């Protein structure tokens, strides 16, 4: 079972998903700590309600100080809207979810609704999400899981976001279970990044 830290900046929808799946036994992980870089993030309140240790930490140094007191296997970036720099011992153990099919619509400046607006503007008929290991460059670490969603001509950026988030709710837990089964080295060694 993976011991995970969840880093978030907002409402904690991914935290809700993790908690539900841990409770029903479909996610083989335990949440050790939840950290937000936003002091009043709704996700922190949810973490407290679920019984997880929850902390506000403004930057990487303070986040890493909290993590050093927790036994962590994986750090999950769950709507964390800053470039996170882990301590050296956790450098290859940070997992992010991105709301597009990498390498499309990714990199610096592509996050959240910006991605969905770009997908709509380009007239794409598919989109999706990518769960990947994070590195020091936005969206360039090894891919663990990708999920594709079909789009309609009349989809809006908002309806695309809804479809993609539903895929994210499946993809992130699936990716964590794969990492639990295969280990982190499997993913770093299978690609050249």
Image: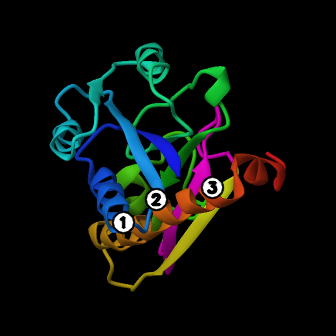
Disc marking residue 165: 1
Q: Mark 2 vs mark 1: which is more N-terminal?
A: 2
Q: Mark 2 vs mark 3: which is more N-terminal?
A: 2
> How are the colours assigned in the image?
rainbow
Secondary structure beneath label 1: helix
The answer to the question of whether label 2 and label 1 lie on touching residues, with beta carbons closer than 8 A, is: yes
Q: Nearer the viewer, residue 10 or 151?
A: 10
> In the figure, is residue 180 to the left or right of 157?
right
What's the residue at 54%, 56% (across, down)?
A: 176
Q: Would you identify the image quadrant in which residue 82 lies?
A: top left
Label 1 neighbourhood size at 10 Å, few (<14), some (14-19), many (20+)? some
Q: Position of residue 91 (x, y in %)?
A: 65, 30
Q: Position of residue 66 (x, y in %)?
A: 41, 19
Up-down: is 167 above or below 153? above
Q: Which residues are magenta?
A: 123-141
> Is 151 within the magenta?
no
Secondary structure beneath label 3: helix
User: Marks 1/3: CA distance?
Assistant: 21 Å
Q: Which residue is mark 2?
A: 99
Q: Which residue is mark 3?
A: 179
Up-down: is 175 above or below 88? below
């Amino acid at each position: 079972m993976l011991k995970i830290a969840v880093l978030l900046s907002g409402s904690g929808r991914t935290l809700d998903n993790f908690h539900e799946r841990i409770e029903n036994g479909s996610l083989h992980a335990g949440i050790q700590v939840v950290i937000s870089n936003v002091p009043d993030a709704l996700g922190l309140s949810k973490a407290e309600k679920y019984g997880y240790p929850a902390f506000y930490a403004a930057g990487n140094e303070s986040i890493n100080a909290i993590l050093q007191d927790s036994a962590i296997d994986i750090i999950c970036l769950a709507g964390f809207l800053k470039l996170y720099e882990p301590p050296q011992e956790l450098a290859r153990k940070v997992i992010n979810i991105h709301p597009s099919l990498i390498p499309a619509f990714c990199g610096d400046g592509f996050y959240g609704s910006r991605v969905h607006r770009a997908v709509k503007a380009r007239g794409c008929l598919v989109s999706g999400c990518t769960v990947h290991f994070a590195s020091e460059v936005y969206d360039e670490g090894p891919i663990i899981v990708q999920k594709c969603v079909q789009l309609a001509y009349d989809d809006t950026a908002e309806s695309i976001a809804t479809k993609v988030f539903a895929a994210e709710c499946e993809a992130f837990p699936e990716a964590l279970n794969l990492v639990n089964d295969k280990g982190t080295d499997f993913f770093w060694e299978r690609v050249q990044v």
